[in-house]
């Protein structure tokens, strides 16, 4: 009688491989935690761009908008605190702090001096007037 002895490798072609593949590449979402995403819509007419960004649960003092020629950046600090009480005793308390950030490039430069921002009910609306395209200047050759 002969015994077949084989070496056991717990990581060789098992379902565990599929679990580990891309583990560090995918964003991890924790149950009950807010999603750190800022969804934006950009529309355009002849004179300006209109940007609508969903940033619910954020105070307008915690939002920053930066404009550099045709580069627009929006950032916000998200603060969320939840507390469950049973009478006077705190039963469960959670705090969450984080930042959201979006940056994008528009096809034409923006007149940052005439730009306007309005924040209401979790939606930031930016009106970004286009700078007039500069006319080409012909140089005189001496």
Image: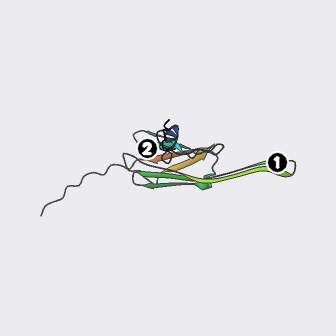
**Left or right: 132 as drawn, with respect to 64:** left
Give me the residue at 46% from left, 39% from top.
Answer: 13
Q: x%, y% of residue 75? A: 53, 53
Q: Residue furthest top?
A: 1
Secondary structure type for disc 2: strand
Whichever of labels 2 and 1 marks the residue nearer the N terminus, that label is: 2
Left of 62 or right of it: where is 133?
Answer: left
Seen in the picture, residue 15 relative to 33 is either above or below; the reply is: above
Q: Residues within 10 Å of mark 2 (few under 14, many from 20)?
A: some
Q: Residue at 42% x, 38% y: name it.
A: 45
Residue pointed to by mark 2: 48
Quadrant occupied by the C terminus:
bottom left
Q: Nearer the viewer, mark 2 or mark 1?
A: 1
From the image, tell me which residue sits under label 1: 85
Q: Residue furthest front?
A: 1
Which element carries disc 1, helix, strand or loop? strand
């Amino acid at each position: 009688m002969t015994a077949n002895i084989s070496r056991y490798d717990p990581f060789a072609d098992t379902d565990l491989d599929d679990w580990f593949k891309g583990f560090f590449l995918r964003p991890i979402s924790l149950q009950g935690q807010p999603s750190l995403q800022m969804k934006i819509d950009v529309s355009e007419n002849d004179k300006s761009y209109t940007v609508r960004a969903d940033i619910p649960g954020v105070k307008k003092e915690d939002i920053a908008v930066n404009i550099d020629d045709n580069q627009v950046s929006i950032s916000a600090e998200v603060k969320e605190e939840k507390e469950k009480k049973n009478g006077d005793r705190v039963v469960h308390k959670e705090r969450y702090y984080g930042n959201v950030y979006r940056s994008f490039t528009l096809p034409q430069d923006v007149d940052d001096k005439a730009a306007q921002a309005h924040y209401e009910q979790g939606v930031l609306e930016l009106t970004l007037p286009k700078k007039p395209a500069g006319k080409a200047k012909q140089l005189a050759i001496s």
